[in-house]
Amino acid sequence: MEVDADAIFLQDGPYWSSAGVTAAIDLALAFVEQDFGRDLALRVARDMVIYLKRPGGQSQFSVALTSQMAGTKGIRDVQTWLAAQPGTQVRLEDMAEVAGMSLRSFTRAFAAEVGQSPMAWLETLRCEQAKTLLLDTHMPLKTVAWRAGFRSDEQMRKVFARRFSVSPRDYRRRFGSAA
């Protein structure tokens, strides 16, 4: 088996391997899906109160989990607020207000703590939401884009092309089992 440091779990013929404890849960759900189908795997995930069953090749990165690591309460508050409503159109000024900071201070503090600008982080959050919807629903691309907070399916397509070198439609086709 070849090592893929970014994968959650891998299968190479009869051999399977996972990256850690929660990745093992994803792996177990993949077994259930492979042997008994997606519907049962989703029912099991719901019974286990698991938010999302991730495909094995998906990156081990979660914007929502990253927001829990922010040290400054104001920055954490903004990340939590945005994660709770990814489809809402927000301005940088709105984020600064939630953080209780001036716009300039907020922008600097966010970039220093998170490693990217607030708007870049929001785009990452929206991409994660869109990927979830693409993988786990049959929603049309326009609906996915709107729910994830993109202004249009065209904007979502451009962002996916820039970030992932793949269109949302191709992402769904490659990784989704609901499509």
Image (tube, rainbow, N blue to C red):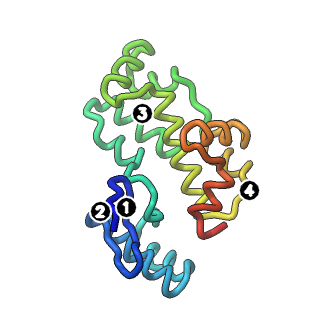
Q: Nearer the viewer, mark 1 or mark 3?
A: 1
Q: Which residue is mark 1?
A: 8
Q: Earlier in the sequence, mark 2 or mark 4?
A: 2
Residue 51 visible in this rendered orientation of the protein: no
Query: Going by the image, does 155 lie left or right of 17?
Result: right
Q: CA distance from mark 1 to mark 3?
A: 28 Å
Q: Which residue is mark 4?
A: 140
In which quadrant is the C terminus drawn? bottom right
Q: Earlier in the sequence, mark 3 or mark 4?
A: 3
Report the residue at 37% width, 14% height from top.
105
Task: Please tell me how crowded label 2 is: few (under 14), some (14-19), or many (20+) other residues with Cα within 10 Å.
Answer: some
- Which structural element holds mark 4? loop
Percent position of residue 178, x then y: 63, 69
Task: Please tell me how crowded label 1 is: few (under 14), some (14-19), or many (20+) other residues with Cα within 10 Å.
Answer: many
Q: Nearer the viewer, mark 2 or mark 3?
A: 2
**Marker disc for residue 78:** 3
Q: CA distance from mark 2 to mark 4?
A: 32 Å
Q: Which residue is mark 2?
A: 19
Q: Earlier in the sequence, mark 1 or mark 4?
A: 1
Q: Amino acid at mark 1?
A: Ile
Report the residue at 35% width, 57% height from top.
4
Q: Amino acid at mark 3?
A: Val
- Which structural element holds mark 2? loop
Give yes or no for contact between labels 2 and 1 (Cβ–Cβ under 8 Å): yes
